[in-house]
Image (cartoon, helix red, strand yellow):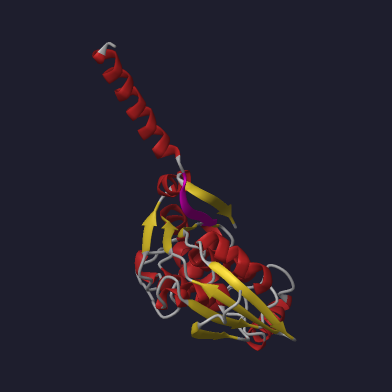
Amino acid sequence: MDMQNVETQLAELKSSLEALDKKTAENKLAMIVFSGDMDKVLAAFVIATGAVAMGMDVVMFFTFWGTPVLRDKKKNVGGKDVMGKMFGTMLPKGTGDVKLSKMNMGGMGTAMMKSLMKKKNVASLEEMISLAEELGVRIYVCEMSMDLMGFSREEFIDYKDLAFAGVATFLQEAQNSKVQLFI
Amino acid sequence: MSDEIQVIKVFDLKGLACPMPVVKVSKGIKEVEIGQVIEAQTTDPGSLSDFPAWAKTSGNEILKTEQEDKLIKFYIKRLV
């Protein structure tokens, strides 16, 4: 048999195996959190923490209305322009300000839901976020949304694995994830 | 199974709602050695389908499931 030929075939096989390896999805969940509604963000964190329990690596990408949910109520940053100040005031400042997508009824529905959750031992959004942090759920915050709404990095919550990134970062993560969700 | 299941550790997950029972059991099972059995007690009806799903995905084995009224007991053997 022609040794040269075998070697060439082996090299070809190797490179196609490597290409296949790159295509194989990891046991990972990549999630876009677009919504800023309390119920939807809560669902996102329930799925995220549940996925870690199932042995998955989890990454969440917060964009648009989801972005202000991760602002820290206690942090105040100065030096914003008029529009930035306006958006800063009108948009929720953290989990305490977010409302139900339905039956909010001027805040009454959200308050009722929160007390019901407590009664039924359902974890609050704040508890879910710290659980996610503890479990190693990675979070990206969309730079474009931040820029648009005039948010600075300094006004976001303290979270171990939080970084600021753009769509390419999310897509890179999503490309090799078994599960992708948009919430 | 002829002999009694020997439980090494009991996890009280009663009253907890989704996703907590599964999150806690996935952490808890790592506290025992591979081959050992834990008992997880829940009152969340969803765990009846969630625990088998979790066990199958994580590669652990549910040896037995017991139900008394609202209380559900899972005997889970750590395999991985």
Judging depth in this view, the residue of A58 and A31 nearest the camera is A58
Q: Quadrant of residue A141?
A: bottom left
- Residue farthest to the top? A2
Task: Pick out the residue farthest to the left.
Answer: A4
At x 44%, y 38%, the residue is A23
- The x and y percentages for residue B68 are 72, 86
Residue B22 placement: quadrant? bottom right
- The residue closer to the viewer here, A150 or A145, is A145
B72 horizontally vs A41: left or right: right
Against B13, is A63 above or below?
A: above
Magenta residue check for A145: no
Q: Quadrant of the C terminus of chain A?
A: bottom right
Mostly what secondary structure, the magenta segment? Answer: strand
Where in the figure is residue A56, as x and y percent of width and height? Answer: 47, 59
Quadrant assignment for the N terminus of chain A: top left
User: On the rendered structure, is B21 left or right of A81?
Assistant: right
Q: In this view of the protein, which residue sits in the foreground, B12 or B5?
A: B5
The x, y position of residue A152, in whole percent, is 37, 64
At a point 25% along the width and 15% down the height, the residue shown is: A3
Can residue A118 be seen? yes
Q: Residue at x 56, y 65 (%)?
A: B55
| Residue situated in front as seen by the camera: A133 or B72 | B72
Tally the numbered discs: 0
Is A115 located above or below residue A144 in the figure? Answer: below
Horizontal side of A95 relative to A19 (left or right) equals: right
- In x, y percent, where is residue B63? 59, 72
Q: Write the start and end of the magenta stretch as one range.
A: A25-32
Image point (55%, 61%), residue name: A65
Could you tell me if residue A93 is visible in this image?
no
